[in-house]
Amino acid sequence: MKQPEASLLRTQEVFMQQLRKLLIPVLILLAVKLLFWFAFFNSQEHRAQDAFFRLRGARPVSGDIVIVAIDDVTFQALNRPWPFPREMHAKLVENLNLAGARQIIFDVEFIEDSNPASDSTLAAQCAVVNNVTFCGKHLRDPANPLHVQVQKPIAPLLSQNKNWGIVNMTMDRDGFIRDYILFEEFDGKPVYSLGMVALANWQKYDPEWESVITQRKGKVNVGGLLLPVIGKNKAKINYYGGAHTFQHYSYNTVLDDSLTAMPGYQGVEIDEFYDLLASGVFRDKTVLVGATIDELHDKFPTPFSSQLTSGVEIHANFLEMARRGEFLHPVEGWLFFLLELLLSVAVFWLFSRFKPPLSAVFTILLIAAYLAVSFFLFARLRAVLPIVEVALLFILLYVAALVSHYLRTHKEKKFIKNAFQQYLAPELVNQIIKHPESLKYGGVAQELTVLFTDIVSFTTYTERHKPEETVLILKEYLTEMVKTIIKNGGIVDKFVGDEIVALYAVPLYTEEHALQACKTALDMRACLERLLEKWKAGGVDPFDFGVGINTGVAVVGNLGSEQIFDYTAIGDTINLGARLEAITRDYDTAHNIIISEFTYAKVQDKVEVRYLDEVKVKGKDFSVKIYELLSVKGFTPGCPG
């Protein structure tokens, strides 16, 4: 491959790696966003946010809002079925007005006519006090969403009082009430909720209350109170606590005075109302009237879900939040998406650089830190951030980085195995796979032993034989020689024609490298003798080889180019090994194996040698003692194959 082509391929590979680091986190983020359209994940997100409410705990309320509860005590005291006669509600209004209530808000539906006299009595009393707000409903047919109707309070009430609002509750898919409906559309106009009407009449009771409500993008202005709108017509409820966070007074205690008796009704008079009147508990207060008894089915689970909260108290939570301006602010969707996108790319890049155990620790710390920041923003600034979504995003980014790391490692191991399995012993290959850092580009100086072996007069040999015959003989010879190198823990550095260069103590260092090389040389001789016998029987001409072994310091490592991997060694030690192999032709030796004094110094107690000479090798300014290797003590040479 030409250099420009190789460089281009390398550039393309780097580009694809960077592109994957960008695309993978983006795809994971999009997948996470998609998951949270499903009910299960959406429910988990809601539950995590509910946990923040409970972790924050209940908060004190102002006391400006109280509840007159139609509760179990009321039914026991009045001893009559539901619905109560409307004269009772008229009397309740009269007493609350007498007690100084600023607003009286009914979370009780008067949408059907009853006794005309009773209806008139209630309407007349409300006209007198002029501070009552009634409720109705906005109904949409599930089978036909376009079919909408509004159930208003009865005509006698509306003829005297235009203040009414709808009491629809919006449930999440898990049945919890977390949002408050501000208005619904009907005949192209907004129909406001009970809480909105109560806010519009908070400062002053006004039949033209709708004039103080204006809408603009993302906000509703109610008499100077700016309400953030989510999902077109809702606000998130900043609950102040669970059930009974607001002060409750039983309905019957407000009725119970000496004036309670009405024609045809009997009751026990204990005059509890006078105590309430004297205490001033209703003075200048917004009083919500509603059912809290289970049998009337007006209770719902909320983030403080240890017990169900009545609908009338949900209205109270909304009013308290709106009046104090303590709204919850869900994070802006697109802005947070961009932040998630940047965070995903950065986190995945970090995970890709970290080892999996460190990435796992970092993931845990990252999730913990995000949860802490999210809770702080919720508790202090009332900001609502996705919780489970981001935690799941971090986990999936870690998993993706883990898979990427595995695939990359597998690719590296496969490359190493393919590069070395033909030249190293299997145990050495496995060790390199465990420590691939030893193969990084560049070299280090270390002690090693090098073995050179070459066929004597091989050029003459090839001239006497056909190329096909030469190739087959050479293949068989080299195969056996390589086996002996691998058997003794060496690495085949390279082939140069019929010459073999083997290294010992690389890429993993061993103290026995000089002895391993000596054993290899003797095994090579044994293999060659066996091959010669075989070839002689087949009529193949014999040949001999020479072996030179030297020990010393050399620069070893991946010394190829960026495109071509070449694990080798260079330096004077390698050059001297080559010179020793060349001079085997100049001495009469038993095995044609010569070792240097440096190798002999490492193995002198373990080998038998014969001193040959002290020679000045070409290219060197000093003489080197050389020895003929005869044997290794206690070692019997043999051919592996």
Image: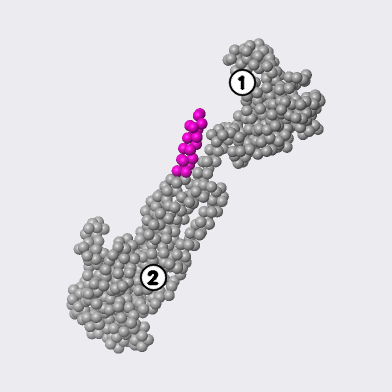
Residue 168 in sight from this viewpoint: no
Provide residue 82's location: percent of width, then percent of height: 28, 74
Q: Could you say which quadrant of the image residue 92 lies in?
A: bottom left
- The answer to whether the residues at label 1 and label 2 have Cβ atoms under 8 Å apart is no
Identify the magenta region. Answer: 1-20
Q: Which residue in the structure is indicated by mark 1?
A: 475
| Depth check, front residue: 421 or 75 | 421
The residue positioned 37% from the left and 53% from the top of the image is: 37
The three-letter code of the residue at mark 2 reads Glu
The three-letter code of the residue at mark 1 reads Lys
Per the model, the C-alpha gap separating discs 1 and 2 is: 86 Å
Provide residue 141's location: percent of width, then percent of height: 24, 59
Q: In the image, is residue 43 above or below residue 161? A: above
| Depth check, front residue: 176 or 361 | 361
Secondary structure beneath disc 1?
A: helix
Provide residue 254's location: percent of width, then percent of height: 32, 82
The residue positioned 65% from the left and 35% from the top of the image is: 556
Packing grade of label 2 (10 A; few <14, some 14-19, many >=20) is some
Q: Quadrant of the C terminus?
A: top right
Disc on res. 326 = 2
Disc on res. 563 = none
Residue 342 in sight from this viewpoint: yes
